[in-house]
């Protein structure tokens, strides 16, 4: 992918090395599979867990032991998260190549979707992309590296741990810059769904659904985001910036993060009723459909079989 020298987006929020974690959020994010079985994100800790932790803290406090101070490495910062200086910070410089790449891919998605929305007589609200390392806080709850990249419709932000691309290559066997670009484009696809009113309707409807039905509907939501990522890929290809083999990189990534493939890798068997992102074949199919067509009308994953 010939991305160097192209426009870079300013809609980047770099939190790498930020010592603040914030409070609990509201839940409802849409995550990219990270191999840990995470799907739609919940709202953080349960009430019972919070009460237990508070009681535990008070017991130790009465014994003269300050757990917050211990967790904070003995500092007087009142429990704030800080990265160990002796252990080496995972914060990357703001102008590193990975950041420049993400900024460029995000800019390309902005150009694509601004043009598509304009053709529909609508304005496209550009999302912000949050780079973090290890853990951070969103309006959809607490996020860690294990969550994987995700989109939070409550704050219109995409969250990306900077180490995920290495995991994508080493753990999933999906290397290449266009595979990485597919990850960003998929999460932006969820933002497009939010702009079109699709996510609000889904979030409202799933409150009345069983877990099994909600999973089935989630699969359709995720596959449409794959199709939208494919649309972006087509417009990017039309600019002449894709290299030979780039499309295969994205299709391989879609193949490697299908629910069936992830479950076989992690536990040796599959549980279809627990799928919430789609099988490998489905993810490949819908990304390819968006790439071949470039039309929103061909990304209707809610009608008929997927």
Image (tube, rainbow, N blue to C red):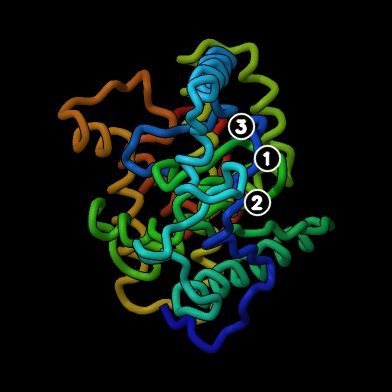
Decide which of 197, 116 is in the foreground and name it: 197
Q: Is residue 240 above or below residue 304?
A: below
Q: Is residue 123 above or below residue 62?
A: below
Q: For the residue carrying disc 3, how many other residues have a C-alpha within 10 Å: few (<14), some (14-19), or many (20+)?
A: many
Name the residue at 53% across, 50% down: 75
Q: Are marks 2 and 1 in contact (CB under 8 Å)?
A: yes
As helix, strand or loop, the secondary structure at mark 3 comes to loop
Decide which of 186, 52 is in the foreground and name it: 52
Q: Is the C terminus in the top left, top right, bottom left or bottom right quadrant?
A: top left
Which residue is labeled 2 in the image? Answer: 157
Q: Is residue 50 left or right of residue 279?
A: right
From the top left corner, tell me how far across and down residue 239 is, in percent.
54, 79
What mark, if any, has residue 139 been given in the picture?
1
Q: Is residue 267 visible?
A: yes
From the top left corner, tell me how far across and down residue 305 is, in percent.
45, 28
Mark 2 vs mark 1, foreground winner is 1
Q: For the residue carrying disc 1, how many other residues have a C-alpha within 10 Å: few (<14), some (14-19), or many (20+)?
A: many
Which residue is labeled 3 in the image? Answer: 28
The mark nearer the N terminus, 3 or 2, is 3
From the top left corner, tell me how far across and down residue 271 is, in percent.
28, 21
Name the residue at 61% across, 78% down: 8
As helix, strand or loop, the secondary structure at mark 1 comes to loop
């Amino acid at each position: 992918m010939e991305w160097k020298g192209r426009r870079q987006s300013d809609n980047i929020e770099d939190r790498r090395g930020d010592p603040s974690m914030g409070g609990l959020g509201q839940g409802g994010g849409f995550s990219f599979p990270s191999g840990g079985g995470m799907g739609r994100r919940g709202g953080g800790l349960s009430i019972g867990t919070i009460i237990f932790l508070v009681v535990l803290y008070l017991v130790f406090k009465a014994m003269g032991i300050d757990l917050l101070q211990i967790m904070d490495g003995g500092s007087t910062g009142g429990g704030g998260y800080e990265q160990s200086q002796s252990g080496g910070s995972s914060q990357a410089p703001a102008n590193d190549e990975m950041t420049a790449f993400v900024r460029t891919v995000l800019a390309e998605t902005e150009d694509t979707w601004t043009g598509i929305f304009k053709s529909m007589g609508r304005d496209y609200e550009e999302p912000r992309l949050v780079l973090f390392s290890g853990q951070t806080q969103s309006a959809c709850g607490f996020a860690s590296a294990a969550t994987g990249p995700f989109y939070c419709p409550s704050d219109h932000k995409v969250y990306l741990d900077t180490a995920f691309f290495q995991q994508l290559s080493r753990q999933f066997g999906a290397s290449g810059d266009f595979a990485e670009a597919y990850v960003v484009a998929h999460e932006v696809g969820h933002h497009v769904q939010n702009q079109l009113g699709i996510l609000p309707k889904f979030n409202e409807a799933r409150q009345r659904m069983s877990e099994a039905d909600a999973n089935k509907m989630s699969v359709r939501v995720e596959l449409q985001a794959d199709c939208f990522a494919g649309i972006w890929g087509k417009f990017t290809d039309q600019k002449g910036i894709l290299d030979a083999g780039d499309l295969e990189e994205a299709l391989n990534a879609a193949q490697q993060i299908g629910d069936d493939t992830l479950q076989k890798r992690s536990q040796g068997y599959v549980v279809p009723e627990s799928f919430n992102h789609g099988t490998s074949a489905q993810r490949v199919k819908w990304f390819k459909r968006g790439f071949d067509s470039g039309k929103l009308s061909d990304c209707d994953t809610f009608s008929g079989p997927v």
